[in-house]
Amino acid sequence: MTLSRRLLCVITDEISDPVALARMALEGGAGMIQLRRKTASGRDLYEWAVRIQELCQQQHALFIINDRVDIAMVMHADGVHLGQQDLPVSAARTLLGPDTLIGVSVSTPEEAVRAAENGADYIGVGHIFPTFSKHKPSKPLGTTAIRTIGNASGLPVIAIGGIGLDNAGEVIRSGATGIAVISAVSGCDDPASATRELLNRIRQ
Amino acid sequence: MAEKHPPLPRLMIVSSGKEHLSHSSLAMKQALIIARSEQPVIFQLREKSLTASDMFQLGHSIATLFKDGKSILIINERFDIALAAGAGGVHLPESSCPADVIRKSARGLLAGQSAHSEAACLETASARLDYLLFGPVFHTPSKTPFGPPQGLERLRDICSKLRIPVFAVGGITPEKVPACIENGAYGIAALAPFLDTVSLPETIKHYHSFMSS
C-alpha cells in the first residue's frame, strides 16, 4: 500500500474520547487516524476500533492501530504503527500479510534501514521539534533528518513531534510525505478546524 | 481445541509478573524446570509491564524449550505475540478484546479466559474457548482486586453449567486441589507456590499427586 502525499495523520491522545476525536479530525479532513492508548484494556480498544474504523471508511481515510497487532488483525485494520519496543516488524508482517500497512517509529538512519529491510511501508520520523505529548529524553532531530533518514531507507516519511501550524509547511518542504500530530489536534477546543488549518498549511 | 495440541495439562503455573524488575529472569528459570518436568504444565506468561518486544523474545525462548514436550506455553492477552513467538495458546483477561472475535483470528492456538462472575463465565462459554479460569475460589492476596473468594459451591455451580474444562484459581494449596476437582474443576492454576525455583520440581510433583482422581 502506498501513502498519499501531504497526508495528515491524527493520533488519539491519552485523555480524550478517541471516537469523538476521530470524528472531528475526519470532519476536518484527516487522511489517517491512528488509535493509540497505551493504558487501555483490550476490550476498550476493540470497541473504539469498531467505531473509528466505520468513521474512517465513510471518509475514505486510513485507520491504523498503534502497537496492538492483535487488535489490527481482528479488525482487519488498514495498518499498524510499531515503536522500537513493539513486536518486531518482520513478525508483524508475517502475521498481517502483504496488504496491511506497517509503519515504524525511527529516529536514526540505522533504524530506518532495518525497518525497510524487515518489511515496513513507511517510517515515522521524530521527534522533529520539541514536544510534550510523549516523554522524550533525546534532543529533537530537526527538519534535516527527514531527508537524511528518509533517503537512507527509501521509505516515505511521516514526520512527528512538535508539529503545528507554524512549522507544518516547512516539514513537508523538507521532504516528508505526511505529518502526524497528537496535541496539535487533540489539545484544541475545536479539533475539526485545527485539522483543517493544518491541512491548509501542508497543501500550500 | 486444535488437533496438534497435546492433551490439556491440569496444572497451570502463572508467571510472576515481575520480569521487568528482576534481572534474574525468573520466568526463564521456571520454564527450564517445567520443560524438564515429567508432569505436563501450562505455563502462562503474564508480564503486563514488559514491552511487546521483550514479551516476544521471552516467549520465543520459552516456546523453543517447550517444543516437542508435553507442557504448553500460553501468552496473556496478546495472541499476536503468541503466534509470532510460537507459543501454544493465549489466555484472555476478563477485560480483553471479546473472546469470540479473537477465536476467529487466533487460528491454531489454544484460547482460554479468566472469569470472575457467573455472567462472565457464561459469556465465555459461548465463545468456543478451550478452557475457563474461574476464581478466586479461596482467599489470596494476589487476587484481592478480583473481589472476595467465590468458594467451592460457586465453583461447582459454574462447572456444572459449562462444558469446557474449568481451572480453579485463587489460594489453591496442594491440599485444596482434591476439593476443587471433586467440585468439577478440570485443573488448577496458581502463581505464588511456584516462585521458588529450588523447590519447583518437587512442588509440581506435589500438586500433580493431589490431581490424580
Image: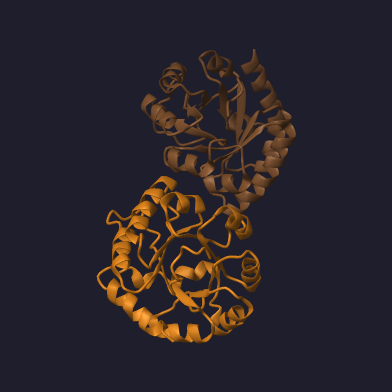
Chain colours: A brown, B orange
Asked if residue B75 is positioned above or below residue B39 in the image, the reply reads above
Q: Position of residue A40 (x, y in %)?
A: 57, 50
Asked if residue A202 is positioned above or below residue A190 in the image, the reply reads above
Front residue (pair B38, A82): B38
Asked if residue A149 is positioned above or below residue B133 in the image, the reply reads above
User: What residue occupies the far left of the structure in this picture?
Assistant: B198
Q: Is residue B41 visible?
A: yes
In the picture, measured across the screen, residue B24 lies left or right of residue B19, that is left
Q: Is residue A86 visible?
A: no
Q: Residue at x 51, y 42 (%)?
A: A67
Q: Position of residue A192 (x, y in %)?
A: 71, 29
Front residue (pair B14, B106): B106
Front residue (pair B99, B4): B4
Q: Position of residue A194 (x, y in %)?
A: 67, 26
In the picture, measured across the screen, residue A153 lies left or right of residue A160, that is left
Q: Residue at x 59, y 25 (%)?
A: A3
Question: Which quadrant of the figure contains the C terminus of chain A?
Answer: top right
Quadrant of residue A21 in the image? top right
The number of numbered badges drawn on the structure is 0
User: What residue occupies the far front of the structure in this picture?
Assistant: B3
Q: Residue at x 34, y 70 (%)?
A: B194
Q: Position of residue A198 (x, y in %)?
A: 64, 22
Front residue (pair A57, A22): A57
In the picture, measured across the screen, residue A202 lies left or right of residue B133, that is right
Question: Which quadrant of the figure contains the N terminus of chain A?
Answer: top right
Q: Residue at x 54, y 14 (%)?
A: A170
Asked if residue A80 is positioned above or below residue B67 in the image, the reply reads above
